[in-house]
Amino acid sequence: QKEVEQNSGPLSVPEGAIASLNCTYSDRGSQSFFWYRQYSGKSPELIMFIYSNGDKEDGRFTAQLNKASQYVSLLIRDSQPSDSATYLCAVGGRGGSYIPTFGRGTSLIVHP
Amino acid sequence: DAGVTQSPTHLIKTRGQQVTLRCSPISGHKSVSWYQQVLGQGPQFIFQYYEKEERGRGNFPDRFSARQFPNYSSELNVNALLLGDSALYLCASSLDTVAPAFFGQGTRLTVV
């Protein structure tokens, strides 16, 4: 049974700060890693994906992957109140199967 | 271009009834995936279809079935509804079989 663990939060950060969201996964053979943002009452939207160890940056977002530690994180720089949402970590399987397993999500609150 | 569209947006059914949910993917996308999201949890994978063939099935009972049509739209059917089937059902489309890139707004199913 593949598991993806996230702290449900809420994680509260002040506007302008760096928000750090973390995710661990159980299947060592996982090959693809995704972050989705879900506003309350809305559907998820893909914001980042990463396949290789290290960092991947896209604007204010940085995804970090450490396969040895089975750990993936999302950093949001210069957090804005509009970033307040639930962030879902999803981990794709091995052997060409990209069907992801989602974590339960971390609620982020950015307060002015 | 229209995004992923799902219908209906809300639905109330009685235990034991059957329901059909519909999804139209983004034009040009050949892969459709279905997810169930219970409040407070991440989406749980139900089915993936690519080029009208089932490419993956999650851990759901046989009461759940789906199909994809020649125009790549899809239907999810659930028979013998249970109270526990109450959830947000999400459809996502992608160009190929990678992780869901774009989600529809979802269908909120309530079973009473």
Image: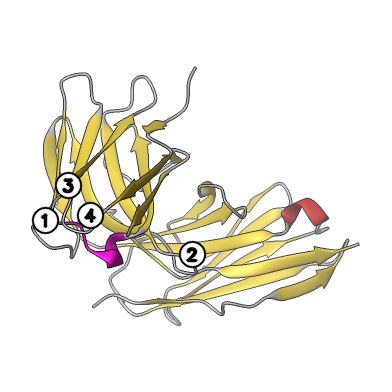
Marks 4 and 2 on same chain: yes
Which residue is disc 2 drawn over? A89
Residue A86 is covered by the magenta coloring = no
4 and 1 marks in contact (CB < 8 Å): no
Camera-near label (4 vs 3) is: 3
Q: Report which quarter residue B62 is drawn in.
A: bottom left
Q: CA distance from mark 2 to mark 1?
A: 28 Å
Amino acid beneath label 3: Gln
Could you say whether the residue bearing mark 3 is in a helix, strand or loop?
Answer: loop
Q: B36 or B102: nearer the eye? A: B36
Camera-near label (2 vs 1) is: 1
Q: Which residue is depicted at the point 32% across and 67% down? A: A30
Q: A8 or A97: nearer the eye? A: A8
Which residue is disc 4 drawn over? A97
Amino acid beneath label 4: Ser
Which residue is disc 3 drawn over? B18
Marks 2 and 1 on same chain: no
Which span of residues is magenta-colored?
B80-85
Camera-near label (1 vs 3) is: 3
Label 2 environment density (alpha carbons within 10 Å; few <14, some 14–19, many ≥20): many
Horizontal arrangement in the rendering, residue A11 relative to residue B80 (left or right):
right
Residue B82 is covered by the magenta coloring = yes
Q: CA distance from mark 3 to mark 2?
A: 32 Å
Which residue is disc 1 drawn over? B63
The quadrant of the picture occupied by the C terminus of chain B is bottom left
Q: Report which quarter residue A3 is drawn in.
A: bottom left
Q: Which residue is depicted at the point 74% across and 68% down? A: A19
Q: CA distance from mark 4 to mark 3?
A: 30 Å
2 and 1 marks in contact (CB < 8 Å): no
